Amino acid sequence: MSRYFLNLSRVFFLLAMAAIVGACAPIGPRGPEPVQYDLGVWTPASVAATPPSAQQDVIVIPEIDARGVIDGQRIVYRFAQAQSYEPRVYNESRWAQPPAEMLRIRLQQQLGLHYPVVLYGEWSGKEGWILLLTLEDFSQHFTSEQHSAGVVQLRATLLRNGEVLEQKLFHVEQVAGSANAAGAVQALAQASDVVVQQVSQWVESRIRK
């Protein structure tokens, strides 16, 4: 009986080890890592000379609010007509950072050419400008199998000393050069540059009033 129980113990031990090894082993070959994209090298947009008094105006930019499928690093695309309600993503490509954060960095760079721009948590003063932003769309829209455009829609609210001064919706579309992730990135990067320039000009025009 002792030999029987000894053999049975060995069987249970081998089965347990096989289960542990099986749990640690990869299931099938790993696919390639997704290709990461960003908005490219930033080139400052041409702007007018800074008014002397503008140097003291501080602009605070909190994190940009983005919800739903565009809140993350996935590159999103949609088809026209009935399938426009079905957002899809490129599985083998993604953004290096969430689009909302990339846009905020670009706005900080552009507005920072003329004004002190700080993050929300870095400003303790009671006076200044706060630029609230909501990213409503950041995706590639297909009108046919070969024709698409990158669409960026951003809602901006400008506050002065805690009071809402003005709100504006910015909507920009740029034609994509190809019907794939690379085309989406190219079009959305170009649309982002236009949006950043439009928002910056709008903010500066309000500050100079």
Image (spheres, rainbow, N blue to C red):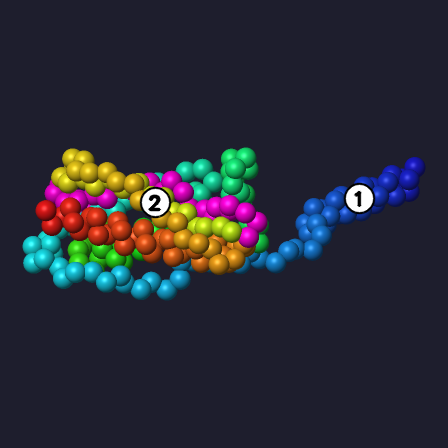
Dot 1 crowding, Cα within 10 Å, few <14, some 14–19, many 20+: few
What residue is pinned by disc 2? 171
Q: Is 206 included in the stretch rendered in magenta? A: no
Name the residue rendered at 13%, 39% in the picture.
161
- On screen, residue 20 versus residue 70, left or right, reads right
Identify the residue at image location x=23%, y=62%: 46
Q: Which residue is mark 1?
A: 15
Residue type marked 2: His
In the rendered image, residue 114, in percent from the top left (x then y), is placed at 17, 58
Task: Tell me the quarter of the image containing the N terminus.
Answer: top right
Q: Nearer the viewer, residue 192 or 57?
A: 192
Q: What segment carries the magenta color?
A: 120-146
Disc 1, SS: helix
Check if residue 134 falls in the magenta segment.
yes
Give the amino acid type for the residue marked by disc 1 in the picture: Leu
Where residue 50 appears, as percent x and y from the top left, is 13, 59
Q: Is residue 63 left or right of residue 166?
A: right
Count of picture labels: 2
Q: Of helix, strand and loop, which one carries label 2?
A: strand
Residue 150: % across, % down: 44, 50
Question: What's the CA distance linking mark 2 and mark 1?
Answer: 62 Å
Query: In percent of the image, x 30 and y 53: which residue is there?
Result: 196
